[in-house]
Amino acid sequence: MKHSPIAAAPVINGLSVDVEDWFQVGAFENVIERSDWDDLSLRVEDNVVRILDMFDEADVKATFFTLGWVAQRHGPLMRRIVEAGHELASHGYDHARVFTFNQKEFGEDIRKAREILEDASGASITGYRAPSFSIDQRTPWAYVELAQQGYAYSSSVAPVAHDHYGWRDAPRFAFRPLPGADLIEIPVTTAMLGGKRVAAGGGGFFRVLPYAFSRWAIRQVNREEGRPAVFYFHPWEIDPDQPRVPGAPVKSRLRHYTNLKKMAPKLRDLVGEFAWGRMDMIAHREAALVEEMPA
């Protein structure tokens, strides 16, 4: 009697949400003052609740990289995230990019955000993602601070060249940025196309490009590389009714508002098609495969 071959278990990919409100994005940082944030419409809580419902329907768990500023104002939401079985992690305090700090200032920012998140949720915070993937070749001291403060992993690098962010010479997959330290960096996903790296980890690329591109990219990483993909998006990306910012540059507005109505249906397809898990789980599994950052 012939036996059917046993199908290989699917690769578990990292699913993450960068929790910030519509006015806290890099695209509007030169148009909307931080001092005005509390006077604007807060929409992040309703959007995160919609995401939690979506994940619950798909029976997937994820990591919510959350601003300390948001956690200060939405403590019950932080507890709801944790009680639903998701990981709560740090996105810094108020979305200031890492390279705008010196080492001491960065250390104060991540310490402040962590204390707020832990107080609000009752959970231990062990993961970090830099706003706008802003850890790069200019900020080697950022990893020193993260390691000294006991973070287990970071997911703060986009290993591509981009006008808004990027560290194109960084490894594509998980690596140890500090010799002798346990801290792991897990870059957001890139795929290889014509011998070049292309961004394929979510956000605006997922919103703007056809769904087939993301399917192809994740399958390439899973099947050809045997590694997990790392996908991210923002709560405001499923909110087509959010306020418009007319004073923003045209390029920023195009990036921010394109295909907002299509985002939620595409996400439902994505979370249903692939296997997903929390980033702390991905960090644990990748620990055996990571390499040290080349000198």
Image: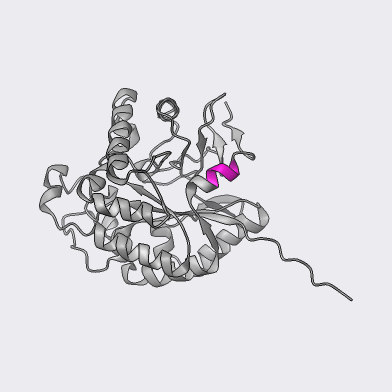
Instruction: Give the overall secondary structure of the magenta segment.
Output: helix
Where residue 261 sits, quadrant-wise, is bottom left
Q: Is residue 285 magenta?
A: yes
Q: Return the x and y of residue 215 as percentages of the image width and height.
A: 54, 65
Taking the spot 16% from the left edge, 43% from the top edge, the residue there is: 34
Tell me: 79 left or right of 13.
left
Residue 207 versus residue 36: which sits nearer the camera? Answer: 36
Residue 133 versus residue 146: which sits nearer the camera? Answer: 146
Does residue 97 appear in the picture of this structure?
Answer: yes
Q: Is residue 7 magenta?
A: no
Residue 236 versus residue 110: which sits nearer the camera? Answer: 110
Q: Which residues are magenta?
A: 282-286
Q: Return the x and y of residue 160 as percentages of the image width and height.
A: 48, 45
Taking the spot 80% from the left edge, 72% from the top edge, the residue there is: 4
Taking the spot 63% from the left edge, 61% from the top edge, the residue there is: 10
Q: Return the x and y of residue 265 as percentages of the image width and height.
A: 40, 72
Taking the spot 31% from the left edge, 23% from the top edge, the residue there is: 104
The answer to whether 276 is drawn above or below residue 183 in the figure is below
Does residue 210 appear in the picture of this structure?
Answer: no
The answer to whether 157 is drawn above or below residue 249 in the figure is above
Task: Quadrant for the C terminus, please.
Answer: top right
The answer to whether 58 is drawn above or below residue 253 in the figure is below
Tell me: 2 left or right of 38.
right
Residue at the limit of the structure toward the right, as seen here: 1
The answer to whether 294 is drawn above or below residue 202 in the figure is above
Q: Return the x and y of residue 91 as percentages of the image width and height.
A: 34, 43
